[in-house]
Every structure is written in C-alpha cells, then in structure tokens.
Amino acid sequence: DTGVSQDPRHKITKRGQNVTFRCDPISEHNRLYWYRQTLGQGPEFLTYFQNEAQLEKSRLLSDRFSAERPKGSFSTLEIQRTEQGDSAMYLCALWAQKETQYFGPGTRLLVL
Amino acid sequence: QQPVQSPQAVILREGEDAVINCSSSKALYSVHWYRQKHGEAPVFLMILLKGGEQKGHDKISASFNEKKQQSSLYLTASQLSYSGTYFCGTASGAGSYQLTFGKGTKLSVIP
C-alpha cells in the first residue's frame, strides 16, 4: 500500500471527449506529482504540486491538460478534447521521506 | 536527457544473478530504482543519493558512481518474483522535484 488511490482505474473514451482523473493521498503529503507512461516507456513527468501550488509543468503538458490541487490534498488532472495519442497510464506519485517518490496504482486511459 | 539503461532485456533461470545498468549524460544527485509488473504501477525499490553509496535489501542491491553518472542494480539468486521491468529514475538536484526515467530493462526469470 503506497498511501495513494487513483480513480478511475480504467477509462475508455472517444476522441474529442474530456476526461478527469483524481488522485487521493491517504494522509497529508506536501508534494504530489503526475506522470504519464506509454507502452514500452518509462514514466514521463507532467507536473508537480507543493501543497496547492503548481510549481512545475513539463512541456508535455499541452494547453489541453490542466491539473489542480485545490486544498493541498487530492489532485485532479483533466484532459480536454482527448486525442488517440493521449492513451497512456496516468500515474500520481507522492514524495516521502528521504527524497523517495511512491506511485499510486494509476489510471489507464484508452482513447478510441 | 533520458538516462540509458542496459541491457534492454534479460532472461535468467531461477538462482542466477543479473546486473542492470543506468547511465546519464548529466550530473546526478540521486538515482531511484523501481520494478513494474505488467499492468501495474512501478514499485519503489531503493534510492541512492550523491555520495557513491551502495544499498541493498534482501538480495537486491545497487551502487551509484556519481563521477561516472552511473548506477547499477544487482539481483542475486533471482527468484520468479523478480520478473518485471526495472526502471531507473534520475534527479539532478536535491528535492527530487521531477524524475527522468530510462526506457526500462525487462527481466524474465524462468524456472
């Protein structure tokens, strides 16, 4: 148990639709990260929050992507006008002691 | 820049040893090792911080040569449960704000 849940675990959508994913830390964590992982690749950094402040965004995060962490606890990642290239596993990670990052179970997105 | 992992894939018989390497062109502060099984999220194994330390737990250990910007993961007396894809993630500064991952090494342990 990594102390973080993600919802939904799987999402199938049609191209052009909007989708939203949620990441829920079980306990308080200052730092929360979003990564994306496509087939055969390692996770790629998308964005990072320190409490409710979004401090860093990858250039992978196009204008169609937006992330929030309104109260410094749970976080949401929204993708607007989905494209087939958005199909991937979206991973939330929490920073723990001694610089480590623990991943949640992920949300697998398939865009048809 | 993405770290380079080698080999890309390796097949072992139970009880054999393996070494997975991770090399970066950038100066590194930390190297993080994860194992991922098919359809699951990556699971944290260990972190090595700048200082050339070696770490281990159970029969898995790792080293970090900061001068060469390289890390190696050592798996000894492999078990079937070691099968999966191993990723190294690297950070160039303290704080681990973002990790840059390699493409992974697929390890298959067969009876």
Image (spheres, rainbow, N blue to C red):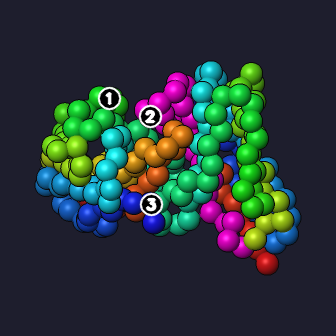
Three-letter code for the amino acid on which mark 2 is drawn: Gln
The reply to whether residue A4 is in sight is: yes
The reply to whether discs 3 and 1 touch (Cβ–Cβ < 8 Å) is no
Foreground of the two, B46 or A85:
B46
Q: Residue at x 69, y 33 (%)?
A: B23
Secondary element type, mark 3? loop
Which segment did they paint magenta?
B80-103
Assign the N terminus of chain A to one quadrant of the image: bottom left
Foreground of the two, B81 or A4:
A4
Task: Determine if marks 3 and 1 fall on one subunit.
Answer: yes
The residue labelled by disc 3 is A2
Residue B55 lies, in percent from the top left, at 73, 46
The residue labelled by disc 1 is A56
Three-letter code for the amino acid on which mark 1 is drawn: Glu
Label 3 is found on which chain of the structure? A
The residue sitting at the bottom extreme is: B111
Foreground of the two, B106 or A48:
A48
